[in-house]
Image (cartoon, helix red, strand yellow):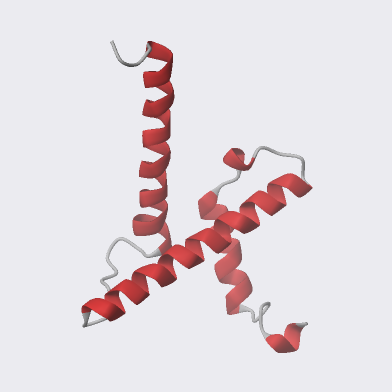
Amino acid sequence: AEASAEELATVYSERWEIESVFDELKTHQRGPRMVMRSKSPDLVKQEIWGHLCCHYAIRTLMVEAAQHAHRDPDRVSFIAALRIARRSVGQGAFSPSAA
């Protein structure tokens, strides 16, 4: 009675968007078997913030790439973007000497 069927359908799809983000963070970015290394509550918070900042940076790159290609950012694969970012970092593409 308080929400229309259309509103409920919209909220339902948004709920699955956050579940997808949790999957990206826990399963793909961090890894399913990786345990937080920090031993104190403050350092655990810092580690979580690091993971969130990394996720945000990858998502930002995805949006910029999608805009450049005139594509919908929701159609860009997080897993592919994560692999590209890892490969770029591993090759030193982000080092000061690469500029």
Q: Quadrant of the N terminus?
A: top left
Question: Position of 6 compared to 38: left or right?
Answer: right
Against 19, residue 26 (above or below) is below
Question: Residue at 52% of width from left, 59% of height from top?
Answer: 56
Question: Position of 84 compared to 99: left or right?
Answer: left
Across and down, in percent, residue 40 comes to 21, 82
Across and down, in percent, residue 73 comes to 63, 42
Across and down, in percent, residue 32 comes to 30, 60
Residue 89 appears anywhere in the view: yes
Residue 37 appears anywhere in the view: no
* Front residue of this view, candidates 59 and 75: 59
Question: Residue at 35% of width from left, 68% of height from top?
Answer: 48
Question: Position of 98 compared to 59: left or right?
Answer: right
Question: Residue at 42% of width from left, 48% of height from top?
Answer: 21
* Front residue of this view, candidates 6 and 70: 6
Image quadrant in which you'd find residue 35: bottom left
Q: Residue furthest bottom?
A: 97
Image quadrant in which you'd find residue 51: bottom left
Q: Residue furthest front?
A: 2
